[in-house]
Image (tube, rainbow, N blue to C red):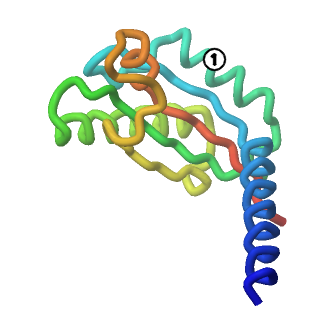
Amino acid sequence: MKRLLTILLVAFSSLVAFAQEADEQEQIVKSVFFGGGSWYIDAEQVQEIKDFLAEHPNIESYTIAIVSHTDNIGGKEYNQWLSERRSQSVAQQLIMMDIPADIITIESQGQNNPLYDNDTWNGRLGNRRVDIFLLPLVM
């Protein structure tokens, strides 16, 4: 019985790892970066978003997940508020680019789950961002 459980656990672990790898390959990501305390998207980044979307002409075959982040400078509540402003700013930009609002989801992380080290200048710069994920719809 113990051997069977071990085999099942190994098989399940392999399946989970395979599913995670497949998800990572299918996710298409574009990051929009912000200055400290800002939710303003400059003209250069607007153009980058347009170019990114142009690479994926069948946008209706995706769900767009907007996930925003901040560095850890400032209080937790302020960073959550800032993260929400950044999410809304990117969502509004997408809607102005004729992306249907009903395919956009928003998740504002605030200072939680930093991708980069907030103890460094470059790390904080990298955490001041919104990631735009294009997730293929399962047919």
Position of residue 75 relative to residue 1, above or below, is above
Q: Is residue 39 left or right of residue 61?
A: left
Q: Quadrant of residue 79?
A: top left
- 64 lies left or right of 6: left
Q: How many marks?
A: 1
Instruction: Judge from the rendering whether residue 122 lies leftward or rightward of residue 45; answer left or right.
Output: left
Question: Which of the 4 image quarters holds residue 11?
Answer: bottom right
Seen in the image, is 18 located left or right of residue 48? right
Q: Residue at x 78, y 45 (%)?
A: 26
Q: Nearer the viewer, residue 76 or 58?
A: 76
Mark 1 Cα shell of 10 Å, populated few (<14), some (14-19), many (≥20): some
Residue 84 image position (x, y, % from top left):
33, 41
Please tell me which residue lies in front, 50 or 18: 18
Residue 105 percent location from the top left of the image? 52, 52
Question: Which residue is labeled 1 in the image?
Answer: 48
Residue 57 position by quadrant:
top right
Helix or strand or loop: what does disc 1 sit on? helix
Q: Is residue 136 above or below residue 52?
A: below
Q: Residue 61: where, in percent of width, then height? A: 78, 52
Residue drawn at 46 percent across, 13 percent down: 42
